[in-house]
Amino acid sequence: MDYYYQAAHQAGAQFAPRSFLTGRLNLPIQDDFRVVAKPMALVWGEQNRLTGPEQAERYRALRPEVPIYRLPGAAFPHIEAPQTFLSVALRFLAEADPALPG
């Protein structure tokens, strides 16, 4: 709770909600996404109105080999379904690098 309080009360914090809602916090990562050499996967919350399923398809077009795990009941899977998110992430990591522990 202290972290959230500090984040909400730091200088300029009043601008964060508007910047988030207007997309000003979004970074153009398409070029970086194309060139990442390490194994990666996307875990996509299909209920997210800001980055819906069509956005996932744009990333699929850039890197067809990157798996997309869709969670239909969540907008932000890492927050709303952390156990499912963790399960998906661990399964992907185990497949990507069998030398990783369990």
Image (tube, rainbow, N blue to C red):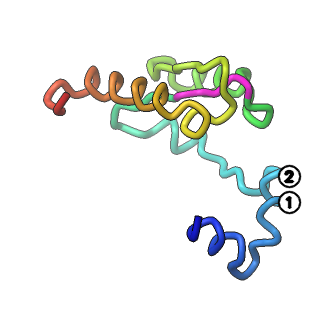
Label 2 sits on residue: 22
Confirm or deny contact between disc 1 and disc 2 (CB under 8 A): yes
Q: Which mark is residue 18?
A: 1
Q: Measured along the vertical axis of the image, is residue 6 above or below residue 24?
A: below
Quarter of image, res 35: top left
Q: Is 101 left, or right, of 84 in this rendering?
A: left
Q: Which residues are magenta?
A: 43-47
Residue visible at 27% across and 20% down? 95
Residue visible at 56% across and 42% down? 31
**Where residue 101 sits: x, y (%)?**
16, 32
Residue visible at 19% across and 28% down? 102
**Where residue 3 sits: x, y (%)?**
57, 68
Considering the numbered disc 2 on the image, is that residue within a helix, a strand or a loop? loop
Say whether residue 45 is magenta: yes
Report the number of discs: 2
> Which of 89 and 63 lies nearest the eye of the viewer?
89
Q: Main secondary structure of the magenta part?
A: strand
Residue visible at 64% across and 36% down? 76
**Where residue 70 sits: x, y (%)?**
58, 19
Q: Tell which residue pokes out farthest to the left in this image.
A: 99
Q: Amino acid at mark 2?
A: Thr
Say whether residue 3 is magenta: no
